[in-house]
Image (cartoon, rainbow, N blue to C red):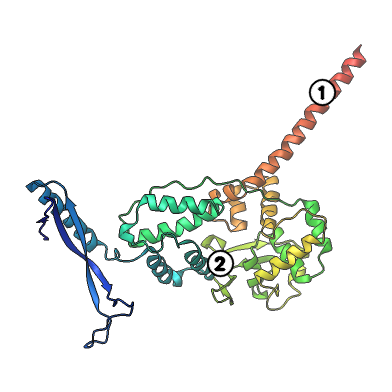
Amino acid sequence: MATAKKLPSGSWRCQVFSHYEPLFSTDGSPVMDPKTGKQKQKRIYESFTSNDPTARGKKEAELLAAQFSLSKNRNPNTSLTVREAVKQYIDLKQAVLSPTTYKEYRCVERLYFSKIGDVLLKDLTNPMIQAWVSSLSTQKAPKTVKNIYGLLTAVLDMFMPEFRVRINLPKPKKAQLHVPSDTEIKELLNCLENEDLKLAVLLAAFGTLRRGEICALTSDDIHGNTVSVNKSMAKTIDGTWVIKQPKTYSSYRNVEYPDFIIDMVNKKKGRIVNLNPDQITNRFCKAIRKTDLPHFRFHDLRHYAASIMHALGIPDVYIMQRGGWSSDATLKSIYRNVIDEEAVRFNQSLIQHINSMQHEMQHEKKKAL
């Protein structure tokens, strides 16, 4: 165990080895070992000081040093910077991450970790993390900040499991999404000239399929009126489109479609929709701009599908199964606005009914007079 030494000031200081760092000369060039041909390393020590000049101060400094050594031995990652830890985490997880998630993680690491990226994991504190999150919150939406912060906490769980993060995230904002109506869906379908895009809209609006799932469908996935969803198309970090497993386990599902959609699908051999997800998005946006419809996204067709099922009184468990949602919490949080809009329509019907009753009562009263 390291022994504390008394300083001229009367304080006690105990030094303990922390880690090695590469050695550089005064001009910034690496100092090489002529025997091994490798860059020389220098030993870095941590100092622990007690201002108590008595023997108790000596024990205090040695205790702090011993606690550091124990923590360092338990966790060999204390010499990593935050950015190095994030990169290692992404590389270690690459085999189990979807190409889209891997690409997003790389983008997040590159764009949003500059302020704390050079901080050593052992020096990271909750105030540092809070300042970083607060700074992000001035530039990004709460959901984006939550996703960025989520990557950091996953990294800390892997490399610093004893570190407890206690900060406040920005409060989420309610998404203002437009859920298309039956009339708007009809108008959109009537103006679509591209057969692939029209089929993509039908598969999304009446079956809740995602873009990647639609693009990965082949004629081998069609069994009678049932479409088997078992794969998805995603873009890798180098921009290549690949076929991968679905987004989640619950995304594996069988979706039954009406005859008129299946008739269109059965005309295809091989891939059902010969577009990639980006092409669907771009062509869909152009189609919306050509109409007088309010702007909504291709993904909002899933919202429309949820609203139809909800309006028909279909139980949440079936809506989750048909849409491939992993939990009712996801369904209720993302599609709460759908339910709210249905509530508005129900309230309007109720008010109209009450007003009608009131008019009838007034009419009958006048007749009685």
Residue placed furthest toward the top: 369
Circle on res. 154: none
Can residue 54 be seen in the rendering of this structure? Answer: yes
Q: Is residue 327 left or right of residue 283?
A: left
Measuring from the top left, give residue 362's x and y in whole percent.
86, 19
The residue under the point 33% across, 78% down is 27
Measuring from the top left, give residue 132's x and y in whole percent.
44, 54
Q: Quadrant of the C terminus?
A: top right
Measure the C-alpha gap from mark 2 to mark 1: 54 Å
Can residue 165 be seen in the rendering of this structure? Answer: no
The disc, 2 or 1, on the residue closer to the chain's N-terminal end is 2
Q: Which residue is mark 1?
A: 358
Query: Pointers 2 and 1 in contact (CB under 8 A)?
Result: no
Q: Along the line of sight, which residue is nearer the eye, 151 or 341?
A: 151
Classify mark 1: residues with Cα within 10 Å, few (<14), some (14-19) or many (20+). few
The image quadrant of residue 35 is: bottom left
What residue type is disc 2 on?
A: Pro
Q: Along the line of sight, which residue is nearer the eye, 323 or 6?
A: 6
Q: Quadrant of the N terminus?
A: bottom left
The residue under the point 82% across, 59% down is 291
Q: Is residue 147 left or right of residue 220?
A: left
What residue type is disc 1 on?
A: Gln
Q: How many marks?
A: 2
- SS at badge 1: helix
- SS at badge 2: loop
Q: Which residue is mark 2?
A: 246
Classify mark 2: residues with Cα within 10 Å, few (<14), some (14-19) or many (20+). many
Measuring from the top left, give residue 14's x and y in whole percent.
15, 57
Q: Along the line of sight, which residue is nearer the eye, 344 or 287?
A: 287
Residue 360 vertical position relative to residue 256 in the rendered view, above or below: above
Residue placed furthest toward the left: 55
Measuring from the top left, give residue 239's x and y in whole percent.
58, 75
